[in-house]
Amino acid sequence: TFHFNFAHVYWNSRLQQEHLRLVRSIDPTDVVCDMMCGIGPFAIPLAKRGCIVYANDLNPHSFAALNVNRQKNKVDGRVRSFNMDGRAFVAHLLASKIHFTQVIMNLPAIALEFLDAFPGQFDHWQGDLPTVHTYCFTTNMDSPDKDVQERAEAVLGAPLTEFRVHHVRDVAPKKLMMCISFKLPAASAYSADKFKDLHSKKPKLAAE
């Protein structure tokens, strides 16, 4: 259940099935960075599922509603809430050495632009790079999947090799809402020097 004021925050009940789809795709052991969490349509059910969620929204009304919702849903211990700019939020988590395995970017109008929070920022990262789920719009009706892929790659500065594009819904006759999910590419996540160093380390051959 969610508590909020329609006058101050965004809510669309038609997205409930999409919320459920993504939540079910994330493992209960995952640690989630929810960059534009709103009132918690992903953060709350993910926490109920067992995830630890670092949830952020710049809108103070959304932030306040999120705090009410995590209390009402008894997931206070698994949802850490923040009221920051999305880029600053990611920088804060990385500087604090908080290891997250999934990233959700649920602000379709501009979320792709916020992918610039990631390039070159993971030089001190330990373990696998996170999977990123980015919601966006496209008006390219001929090749919507390719359009979304290429726009994400342009911001990341690297090709995507592990990704999938999901058609969420038709927003208008020539406008689609999409979700692109991908493993953050190493060529983007690490600085050029770090990436070069990682790929120059070849496994040693066993002595004959």
Image (cartoon, helix red, strand yellow):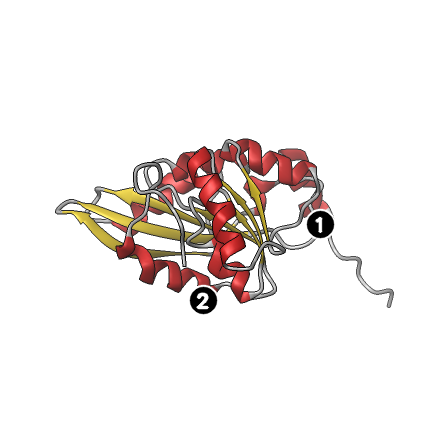
Badge 2: how crowded within 10 Å, few (<14), some, or many (20+)?
Answer: few
> Which residue type does callout 2 highlight?
Arg
* Quarter containing the C terminus: bottom right
The label on residue 126 is 1
Percent of width and height locating residue 84: 53, 33
Percent of width and height locating residue 145: 30, 51
Helix, strand or loop for disc 2: helix
Q: Which residue extends farthest right?
A: 207
> Which residue type does callout 1 highlight?
Gln
| Front in this rendered view, residue 63 or 35 | 63
- The structure residue drawn at horizontal position 58% and vertical position 41%, both measured from the top left corner, is 189
- The structure residue drawn at horizontal position 68% and vertical position 36%, both measured from the top left corner, is 95
Please say if 90 is above or below 102: above
- The structure residue drawn at horizontal position 38% and vertical position 58%, both measured from the top left corner, is 19
Helix, strand or loop for disc 1: loop
Task: Name the residue beneath numbered marker 2.
Answer: 24
Q: Which residue extends farthest left?
A: 173
How many labels, in total? 2
